[in-house]
Amino acid sequence: MNPADVAQAAPVAHDMSFFGLFWQAHFIVKLVMLGLLAASVWCWAIIVDKTLLYSRTKRAMDRFEDVFWSGQSLDELFRSLQSRPATGLAAVFVAAMREWKRSFEGSGRSFQSLPQRIDKVLDVTIQREVERLNSRLTVLASIGSAGPYIGLFGTVIGIMNSFTSIAASKNTSLAVVAPGIAEALFATAIGLFAAIPAVLAYNKLQSEVGKLQSRLEGFADEFSAILSRQIDERIGHAGHHPANAA
Amino acid sequence: MALKLKFNTSEPGFWVSGVAHAAMLTAAMIGLSSVAEFPEAQEGIPVEIITDNQLSQITKGETNAKTVQQKPRAERVADKTEQKDPGEDKRDAPAPPKRPAEMKVADKEEPVAAQPPPPAPPTKSQEEKAAEAKAVEEKKLIEKAEAEAIEKAKAAEQAKVEAEAKAKAEAKAKAEAEAEAKRVAEAKAKAKAEAEAKAKVEAEAKKLAEAKEKAEAEAKARKEAQLAKKLDMGDLKQFLDSKEKNQSTGATGAEVQKTASLGTATGSAAKLSPSLRDALIGVLVSQIERCYSAPIAASGGQVTAPVLDIRLNQDGTLSTEPRVLQAGSSSTDRAVADAAVRAIRKCRQFEIPAKFAPYYTDWKVLNVQFDPPLS
């Protein structure tokens, strides 16, 4: 091909809009761009979901604590919560109460290791709750850390591609080189576009999970203290029904 | 993947995110579809670095010439070997004479001043008018008479030629012609007298009119002069335009060189090559040596050669007193330097070979290292 022809044709052929940049890119670069765009969509989906979830959880915790410390009978509270799947503090409460109830339902009353069992149940429940809150946050972390690299990969491929085409056209004028490099850099731009919100959101959401977790643990400790006091009282004057406690 | 593609109010993230991305991409495609172009880049100016020495050696020539010639351009050999720059000769034409203030109006008012005379005649008296008319009539008559006379004279001549035989006729014609001539002369005299009288009358009238006009004009002129004193743009413009057009004067030089040499118009050097310069210094030193008598102190041992500043005129005479630029520290060295200066003064005029003449600007000032001859 005549270099002069290439030089003449090159400026005409290049459309510098977003779509144009995408459409002229190499196949692999296109895949990278699409993947990063999908990652960005996914990452924002997670951010929205998690933000809503945490605010909902927080509100639920506030409400539950209000009810719990209002002096209402624990049995009553348990009965009202038992029927539907509970989350957050309610789940912790329900799990502990269930274990408590079970200990008193059977003929053989087993008080000996009840506090340990309740602690175990509380731990497991807290873990499950935190797991639920934490789920999919790793996706954000992955996108945040890998996004730029994926974009860079696309860029490198794109630049390699444009250099090979420079070699093929035997023309190094900037007008020939620039469009290919612009396309290639577009991949990095998308990578950063996906990664930056992911990193920021990951840090924010992580700290919120931490706060919620400590709140759950605090409640579990308090509740476990209340229950063990009850158990000790029961052991003191055996025969009383625990339902009248609190 | 835990994403549910059905819309769920508790987890609307996917849809919110998807819609937001779609909206943003659309906005980007619409908003960023056109690329702003860079402004037209200006080409860089190549810069070369030259040394002081090179700068001082910049060849005298013309910037639009093709190559550097051996000699600067000279269209003819000057009678006096004077090097003239090629190109334009700028001369100031003398400024046009400035009118005195009271005359300021004269030119400008010309159309106005010229008008009064026609109205002037009506001021003449009836008598004058009549005289004038008469004079005109008489003039006409005289003209007529003259014409007749000429005709008649012609006829007479013809007759003379024709009728040599007819003496009678001839005599008659002669008499007639004489009579006619007499009459003509009389008429002429009369007309002259009449014209003189008329002229006198006219002149008197004119004088009166002129006196009046002059008074008016003077008054006007005074007014104009007052105005003109302030600012007269026309006058300024005329003054500024008074420069004559530049004319090409042929460049002159020691030798004719028709082709322009590449260089700058302000350059001072017709290029004196290093070897030529050394040759010239050699010539000078040999001449100085002839005039030099070594001081007794310098007869033995090493002597530091002094560097002398010699400034020459074109004919080889000294333009200023020679100076010692550099000399050794010992008394012997100083003695040698002084002796060298004395030698230069003694030589008074150096013989500069003619081939160096074109390069005068280059050897006007010379720093010569004078190695005293061992003797």
Image: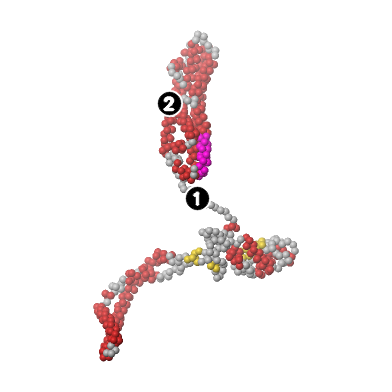
Label 1 close to label 2 by CB (< 8 Å): no
Q: Amino acid at mark 2?
A: Leu
The answer to whether one can see residue B198 in this image is yes
Q: Residues within 10 Å of mark 2 (few under 14, many from 20)?
A: few
- Look at the picture and state if B190 lies above or below B119: below
Name the residue located 38 percent from the left edge and 66 percent from the top edge.
Answer: B227
The span picked out in magenta is A151-173
Residue behind mark 2: B5
What separation in Å lies between label 1 and label 2 (alpha carbons)?
58 Å
**Subunit bearing disc 1:** B
Name the residue located 57 percent from the left edge and 63 percent from the top edge.
Answer: B71
Residue reaching furthest top? A107
| Residue A240: x %, y % from top left | 49, 10
**Does B184 appear in magenta?**
no
Image side of residue B209 versus residue A19, left or right: left
The answer to whether one can see residue A73 in this image is no
Residue behind mark 1: B43
| Residue A238: x %, y % from top left | 51, 10
Q: Which type of secondary structure does the marked residue at label 2 adopt? A: loop
Q: Quadrant of residue B305?
A: bottom right
